[in-house]
Amino acid sequence: MDGLPETIATEETLDPRDWADMQALSRRIVDDAIGYLKDVRDRPPWREMPAEVRAFFSAPLPRGPAPLADVYGDVARNVMAYPMGNIHPRFWSWYMGSSNFTGALGDFLAAIQGSNLGGGNHAAGLMDSQVVDWCKEMVGFPASASGTLVSGGSMANIIGLTVARNVKAGVDVRERGVGAIPRPLRFYASDQVHSCHRKAMEALGLGNRALRRIPTDAGLRIDIDALKTAIAEDREAGFKPACVIGTAGTVNTGAVDDLQALARAAAEEDLWFHVDGCIGALIAIAPESRSLVAGIEQADSIALDPHKWLHAPFEAGCALVRDASAHRNTFAVTPEYLESAPRGLASGEWLFDYGLQTSRGFRALKIWMALKEHGVEKFGRLIDQNIAQARYLTRLVEAEPALELMAPTTINIASFRHRLAGASEERLKAFNTEIMLRLQEEGIAVLSDTTVRGRHCLRVAITNHRTRRDDLDLLVAEMLRLGREIGAAATPT
Ligand SMILES: *Cc1c(COP(=O)(O)O)cnc(C)c1O
């Protein structure tokens, strides 16, 4: 065996040459990460990147090696220092969760194990299915339902709508395609529906116009009578009404459609009932607020988003389908190179039979670890806490003559604006946009804006386990200060 060591040494690997060095560096990275989260409140939520940082990302493909400590130094300087900011207690933009350290450890360990969750007989596969089972339990779905973890809510909605299309097509749409559907399908949702449904309709080959937007009531919930009228019109005109999408928490204002009424309407009209619960499905675990989403358990399919109110690090979405065989029949294909074996690794279930991906990441672990550590009851209380905080902010806005509430606050989203005496809508928009941008640039808070019934407003969406009420007090005080400064500087038009 003389000479063998040299032979072995000629083979390359990605493993470190010196594990002890790697251990020391890794400890430093973990220490830095803990400090980063511990001190998050002391940093601005967001800041603009200087030109040299932008330029850093134009460097060409590295040809040769660099010490990992230097690579990490680059990441710390140029990436960690300029985050989106959604882990900050005063980040309330758009709609996203604020991550958590345990979930980050889960992502790390998942990557260390490196398993592919396309399927197979291994522990990660069982955990993936267990997390899906827990999601079913959280929303009151039966154990016989099926589901799959996906990248996020947009994919989860596509999964649900694809099953709906195939079940209602009246033809084997997998084999023959949408061109063979005898009567064009119609889907329905409120005019507040998330834009991902438009993309889904387009990708499904049904087209944007096949999704009818139904007007909303004063609370921005779908108008059930208008829905029924639209369905009757469509039947009359030769369309096949196929699916109604209820939204549990719209992204604009947090409105929750009357899911019980929608479930009844869907049953009467023989429609698939899909719930976009990316924001609100998990309100079902919140003790004070769960009645808001009563009826969700009657859906045929649900999209929910663990990377929102479970604060899982991105990405994690979940699609649930009541009829497991309809779900499987929509996606399952078993090519010869993926046939299961009677025993061993290939004897487990093929999880890719429930969605579009073949290889799948081990996204269950980050969700599983955080749920185990805290228990689902705490996540429910945190949801109630955010809803109570949005109501608190709403009261501050209502008590402050300079501010104006722009939509009812149902859950954790408050929409409001700063008034400006005698100003046109256009000028109000410019004024409030300036306030929003200064709040960001001065490192105070990050909010976003939207338009509700044609009127521009600022929007605070509190999906944040770090927010405290004094953060909201600070927001209002700073908005009033900026309102005075910007209002005084502007020449009246
Ligand atoms: C966030 C959201 C989506 C999209 O989910 P992603 O996880 O961002 O893909 C869909 N619908 C609603 C109501 C949402 O809030």
Image (cartoon, rainbow, N blue to C red):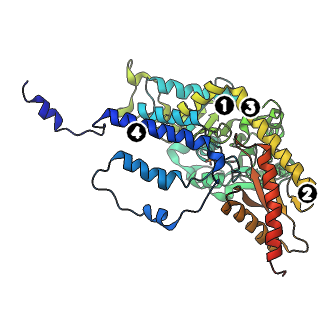
Q: State how far apart marks 1 and 3 are (Cα).
A: 23 Å
Image quarter of residue 486 = bottom right
Quick one: 462 or 471, which is closer to the camera? 471
- Pointer 1: what residue? 322
N-terminal of the two: label 2 or label 3? 3
Residue type, label 3: Gly
Indicate which label's residue lies in the foreground, 2 or 3.
2
Quick one: 52 or 395, which is closer to the camera? 52
Residue 106 in view here = yes
Residue type, label 1: Arg
* Quadrant position of the C terminus in the picture: bottom right
N-terminal of the two: label 1 or label 4? 4
N-terminal of the two: label 3 or label 4? 4
Q: State how far apart marks 1 and 4 are (Cα).
A: 47 Å
- Pointer 3: what residue? 380
Indicate which label's residue lies in the foreground, 1 or 2.
2
Residue at mark 4: C-beta within 8 A of ligand 1: no
Residue at mark 1: C-beta within 8 A of ligand 1: no
* Quadrant position of the N terminus in the picture: top left
Indicate which label's residue lies in the foreground, 3 or 4.
4
Q: Residue at x 68, y 49 (%)?
A: 95
N-terminal of the two: label 2 or label 4? 4
